[in-house]
Amino acid sequence: MKAAVVVFPGSNREGDVAAALARATGRAPLMVWHRDSELPKVDLIVVPGGFSYGDYLRCGAIAAHSPVLREVKARATAGTAVLGICNGFQILTEAGLLPGMLLRNAGLGFVCRNVGLKVETSQSLFTSAYAAGQTLSIPVAHHDGNYFADPAVLDRLEEKGQIAFRYCAADGSVTREANPNGSARNIAGVFNETKTVLGLMPHPENAVEPLQGSTDGAPLFKGIVEALA
């Protein structure tokens, strides 16, 4: 499986996700600069976390119009798998590849800690190594992670199984207290309609080995490799 990681000025998790991919695949991913207008043939494109373009205007708003994103959108439309993590999630919503938007956290502060995450479905290439209903411990690190969409869009996401993860308590209960940023319906990650594009705010790449305090992110990368190999 070949993967590419898109790098913007202000990205700061590209090394982390590259290491997680190398650990899962046995080969280093290609690193693609934001000004590149072409992408090599790959099975997976990752848009990593960070503060692309300094989060000017809105988080991800400028990056969504970078030269490389035109090709990312074309590849996604053609069915190539795309994963956006944190700022990458923000970029994918700004680019129109995922529904909704990410607003400033309800508490107006930066949140950086491990959170409970409930797997909503195992029926995707990203979540196939998890069980539906499984509870994970994954770190978040964001200021603008408050997922928002109008009620009709949220209902459609529910109906079509496009919600990938929700914030939850340790026992798996989806509660207001377990929501770190005020996201609508505790949503932490969503798919596109074909489930070939996933955006999520938590950082699975920072939960792949024991020294990080959790290995709950490793199955995400394992599942991707198995699905795309």
Image (tube, helix red, strand yellow):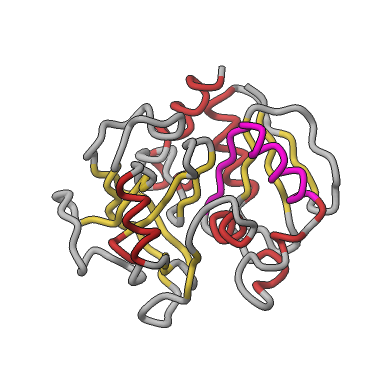
At x 41% / y 31%, what residue is drawn?
A: 124
Q: Nearer the viewer, residue 17 or 47?
A: 47
Q: Nearer the viewer, residue 31 or 73?
A: 73
Give left or right: position of 197 versus 208: right
**For residue 92, which quarter of the picture?**
bottom right
Q: Quadrant of the N terminus?
A: top right
Q: Quadrant of the C terminus?
A: top right
- Magenta stretch contains residue 78: yes
Residue 53 vertical placement versus 17 (above, below): below
Give left or right: position of 19 versus 179: right
At x 52% / y 27%, what residue is drawn?
A: 24
Q: Position of residue 211 (x, y in %)?
A: 41, 43
Q: Which residues are magenta?
A: 68-85
Q: Nearer the viewer, residue 147 or 12?
A: 147
Q: Position of residue 171 (x, y in %)?
A: 14, 50
Q: Nearer the viewer, residue 35 or 22?
A: 35
At x 73% / y 57%, what residue is drawn?
A: 8
State the count of labels: 0
Q: Position of residue 80 (x, y in %)?
A: 63, 32
Q: Which residue is most to the front?
A: 152
Q: Position of residue 130 (x, y in %)?
A: 32, 31
- Magenta stretch contains residue 183: no
**For residue 62, which quarter of the picture?**
bottom right
